[in-house]
Image: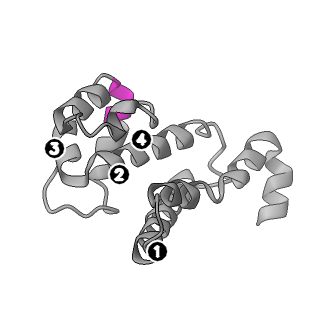
Amino acid sequence: MPPDHPAVDDPKSSMRDIAQIISADQSLSARLLRLVNSAFFGFPSKIDTISHAVTIIGKKQLRDLALATSVIQMFRGIPSHLIQVRPFWEHSIGCGIASRLLASFHKVPNIEQFFVTGLLHDIGRLILYNHNPEQAKEALT
C-alpha cells in the first residue's frame, strides 16, 4: 500500500479495506508483520494477520510503518560494515514515534507529519553511505 493511498485518510474506509490493500503486497505485508511482532512494539502475543495488525495499531500508524519500511528498503544494499540497518531502523522509528507523541502532547495540528519528520531525520546518512560509502564512513564515525 503506498503510504499516501487515499483509503487511509478516507473516513468511509474500514479496517478491512485497509487490510485488503496492504495484503495485496506480500513483501510489504511480511515486513509489517515482522515489525509489529518485534520487541519494539512488545505485544504479548503474536500478530499473524494484517487485519489483526490494523485493528491493534490503527490504519494511520500502519500507513506510517508502510512508509518507513519502504524507505528503508531503498537502502538495503549498503554493506553492513558501514552501517547496521536494523539499529538505524529502530532508531528512526523511535524518533518518529517520539516526534508524534511530542506533537500530540503540545496539541500541534497534523501530528502525523511529525512521525515522518522524525523517521526521516537521519536519511541523509543513508544517502551518503549509498553514494560515497568510504568517505561517509570516515566522516560519520
Between the residue at mark 1 and the residue at mark 3, the CA separation in whole angstroms equals 27 Å
Could you classify mark 2 by the number of other residues whose Cα lies within 10 Å: few (under 14), some (14-19), or many (20 or more)? some
Residue 7, compared with residue 80, is above or below; it is above
Q: In which quadrant of the rendered image does the C terminus lie? A: bottom right
Instruction: Look at label 1 and name its amino acid.
Output: Leu
Badge 4 element: helix
| Farthest-out residue, bottom | 106
Can you identify the residue that label 1 sits on?
A: 102
Name which of mark 4 and mark 2 comes first in the sequence.
2
Percent across and percent down for residue 37 are: 26, 52
Q: For the residues marked 4 and 2, what is the alpha-carbon distance in whole angstroms?
A: 9 Å
Which residue sits furthest top? 24
Q: Main secondary structure of the magenta part?
A: helix
Q: Secondary structure at mark 2?
A: helix
Q: Which residue is mark 3?
A: 52
Color encoding of the figure = one colour
Can see residue 74?
A: yes
**Around disc 1, counting alpha carbons within 10 Å, would you say few (fewer than 14), some (14 to 19), or many (20 or more)?**
some
Q: Which residue is mark 4?
A: 66
Residue count near mark 4 (Cα–Cα under 10 Å), binned few <14, some 14–19, many ≥20: many
Q: Within 10 Å of the Cα at label 3, are there few (<14), some (14-19), or many (20+) other Cα atoms?
A: some
Position of 77 compared to 52: left or right? right
Q: Nearer the viewer, residue 13 or 69?
A: 13
Which residue is found at the position 48% from the left and 58% from the top? Answer: 115
Give, as a single range, the part of the protein colored magenta: 25-30
C-alpha distance separating marks 2 and 3: 13 Å
Amino acid at circle 2: Gln
Look at the numbered discs 1 and 3 and tell me whether their residues touch, using CB distance below 8 Å: no
Nearer the observer: mark 2 or 3; the answer is: 2
Q: Residue at x 65, y 58 (%)?
A: 122
Q: Residue at x 15, y 44 (%)?
A: 52
Q: State the residue in front, 88 or 119.
A: 119
